[in-house]
Amino acid sequence: MYDAFLASESLIKQIPLILGPGLNKAGKFPFLLTHNENMIAKVDEVKSTIKSQMKKLLCLTVVVDHVKITDDELVYNIHQAVNSLVSLLKKN
């Protein structure tokens, strides 16, 4: 099973028509990769991206680490995860 997908803009427009809402519901909709972007850099960016969505859940799990990460990257990922989760909370 794959954790993430990359696709061009023209392909991303066709995915919902061909596959329906399945990828969105599974949280696996592809990330946009333009022809100007470096694919290796985009893969690294996607690996460090957190997708979070709150519905009626009382607990969440967020991955912030892997075996080849430095301490500074870990601290940055934790800050990003917390900020992402805080942004999902209701205002007031």
Image (cartoon, rainbow, N blue to C red):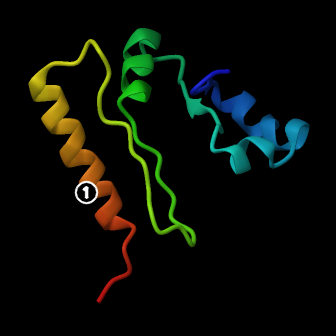
Going 42% across and 10% down the picture, which residue do you hit? Answer: 40
Question: In the rendered image, which quarter contains the C terminus?
Answer: bottom left
Label 1: few (<14), some or many (≥20) within 10 Å? few
Answer above or below: position of 35 versus 15: above
| In this rendering, position of residue 2 left or right of residue 88 | right
**Residue 16 x, y percent position in the rendering:** 81, 43
Going 35% across and 30% down the picture, which residue do you hit? Answer: 48
Q: Quadrant of residue 17?
A: top right
Number of residue marks = 1
The one nearer the camera, 29 or 10, is: 29
**Residue 76 x, y percent position in the rendering:** 17, 37
Answer above or below: position of 8 versus 92: above
Furthest residue in direction front, as rendered: 59
| In this rendering, position of residue 57 left or right of residue 17 | left
**What amino acid is found at the position of numbered circle 1 in the picture?**
Asn
**Residue 9 x, y percent position in the rendering:** 65, 31
* Tag 1 residue: 83
The one nearer the camera, 92 or 8, is: 92
Question: In the rendered image, which quarter contains the N terminus?
Answer: top right
Answer above or below: position of 3 versus 19: above
- Secondary element at image label 1: helix
Q: Quadrant of residue 44?
A: top left
